[in-house]
Image (cartoon, helix red, strand yellow):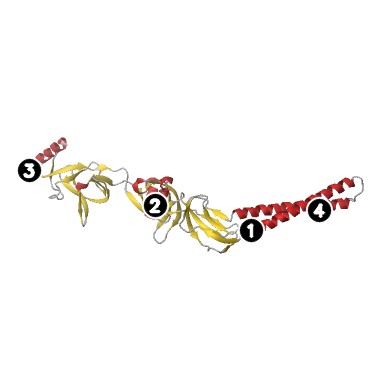
């Protein structure tokens, strides 16, 4: 800094301008800003896939979890009446017992006739007929056993549970209603698969392609600098607002902080061309626009328009023609005008 002051004093003297005739200022150099410009995109929390809990049997609904209820995996979400199905099971068990009896008798008779046929006491046609009766009895038993297996499964599904940790969503049934097989009883919204659906302007999409090679390579952050990962995007532009839907992943450890349908914002960084960091004291903010003064090599100052992008406690991040390393005036700006000669104090 002493060298700079001595150099400027030499300039004053060589051009016939004394330090007493110049305006005393203090400067700091514009610093590099590596992160680029912070852009904001509006997003909504969404759950791409939900679970439908559906009826497995035609039966009366006697209880159902209410919409909004928080559930854990395995928690009950609905109960249907079991009276008719259990009666069907009792009747089916009787039929199975009868089928077993018929099969045992038919098989025993077949084996008896088979032993007699070896001595030619029984006609082949009679033996074949008995064999057919035995096989039909066995098939009947097997069919009824499969029916019982399916019925027992349906009875077990009269009490339905949540497949995941989540929240009960839409409930489109009424207590006392006879629910058909396959009809949805409740919807469960998972807790751990939420993502962000963001409306990215087409202009930003195009800019990211040229700057970082595509939106999938951009660095997205939630509030508190929580990074979020690119998942996918729709290759379809909304004709009304000229945006593209981009989907971002919410980290598992932050899933519980967000609710389905909640609106939030995400920041991403674009190209840092023309962006520098200068002290807040260097920026003059006026209704017609903001600017800063730069001391040039000939000790004269020049006004540069600046666009304030963001700030921290000591500096503004600005887009401007000011280049890294240029000395910007932080004190003594009051009487400056374009071309005014300055004297830089140490």
Q: Residues within 10 Å of mark 4 (few under 14, many from 20)?
A: some
Looking at the rendered image, the disc whose residue lies closer to the viewer, 4 or 1, is: 1
* Gap in angstroms between the C-alphas marked 4 and 1: 31 Å
Q: Is residue 184 above or below residue 214?
A: below
> Is tag 3's residue or tag 2's residue first in the polypeptide sequence?
3
Image point (35%, 46%), residue name: 225
Looking at the rendered image, the disc whose residue lies closer to the viewer, 4 or 3, is: 4
Contact between marks 4 and 1 (CB within 8 A): the answer is no
* Gap in angstroms between the C-alphas marked 3 and 2: 54 Å
Check the picture and name the quadrant holding the N terminus. Answer: top left
Q: Which mark is residue 20?
A: 3
* Gap in angstroms between the C-alphas marked 3 and 1: 105 Å
Q: Residues within 10 Å of mark 2 (few under 14, many from 20)?
A: some
166 horizontally vs 145: left or right: left
> Which element carries disc 1, helix, strand or loop?
helix
> Is tag 3's residue or tag 1's residue first in the polypeptide sequence?
3
The residue tagged 4 is 133
Looking at the rendered image, the disc whose residue lies closer to the viewer, 2 or 4, is: 4
Contact between marks 2 and 1 (CB within 8 A): the answer is no
Residue 208 place in picture, x, y as percent: 38, 49
């Amino acid at each position: 800094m002493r060298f700079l002051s001595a150099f400027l004093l030499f300039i004053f003297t060589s051009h016939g301008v004394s330090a007493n005739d110049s305006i005393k200022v203090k400067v700091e150099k514009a610093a590099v800003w590596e992160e680029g410009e912070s852009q904001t995109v509006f997003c909504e929390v969404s759950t791409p896939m939900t679970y439908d809990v559906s009826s497995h049997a035609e039966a009366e609904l006697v209880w159902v979890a209410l919409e909004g209820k928080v559930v854990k995996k395995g928690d009950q979400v609905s109960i249907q009446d079991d009276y008719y199905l259990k009666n069907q099971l009792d009747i089916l068990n009787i039929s199975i017992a009868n089928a077993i009896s018929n099969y045992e008798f038919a098989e025993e008779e077949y084996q008896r006739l088979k032993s007699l046929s070896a001595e030619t006491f029984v006609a082949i046609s009679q033996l074949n007929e008995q064999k057919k009766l035995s096989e039909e009895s066995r098939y009947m038993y097997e069919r009824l056993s499969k029916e019982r297996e399916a019925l027992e499964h349906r009875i077990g599904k009269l009490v339905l549970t949540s497949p995941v940790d989540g929240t009960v969503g839409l409930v489109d049934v009424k207590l006392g209603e006879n629910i058909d097989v396959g009809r949805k009883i409740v919807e469960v919204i998972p807790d751990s698969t939420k993502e962000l659906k963001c409306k990215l302007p087409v202009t930003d999409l195009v800019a990211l392609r040229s700057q970082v090679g595509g939106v999938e390579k951009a660095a997205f952050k939630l509030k508190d600098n929580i990074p979020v990962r690119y998942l996918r995007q729709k290759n379809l532009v909304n004709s009304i607002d000229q945006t593209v839907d981009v989907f971002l992943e919410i980290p598992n450890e932050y899933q519980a902080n967000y609710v389905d349908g909640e609106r939030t914002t995400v920041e991403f960084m674009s190209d840092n061309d023309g962006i520098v960091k200068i002290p807040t004291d260097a920026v003059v903010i006026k209704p017609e626009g903001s600017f800063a003064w730069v001391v040039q090599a000939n000790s004269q100052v020049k006004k540069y328009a600046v666009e304030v992008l963001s700030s921290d406690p000591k500096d503004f991040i600005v887009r401007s023609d000011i280049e890294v390393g240029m000395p910007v005036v932080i004190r003594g700006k009051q009487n400056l005008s374009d071309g005014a000669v300055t004297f830089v104090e140490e």
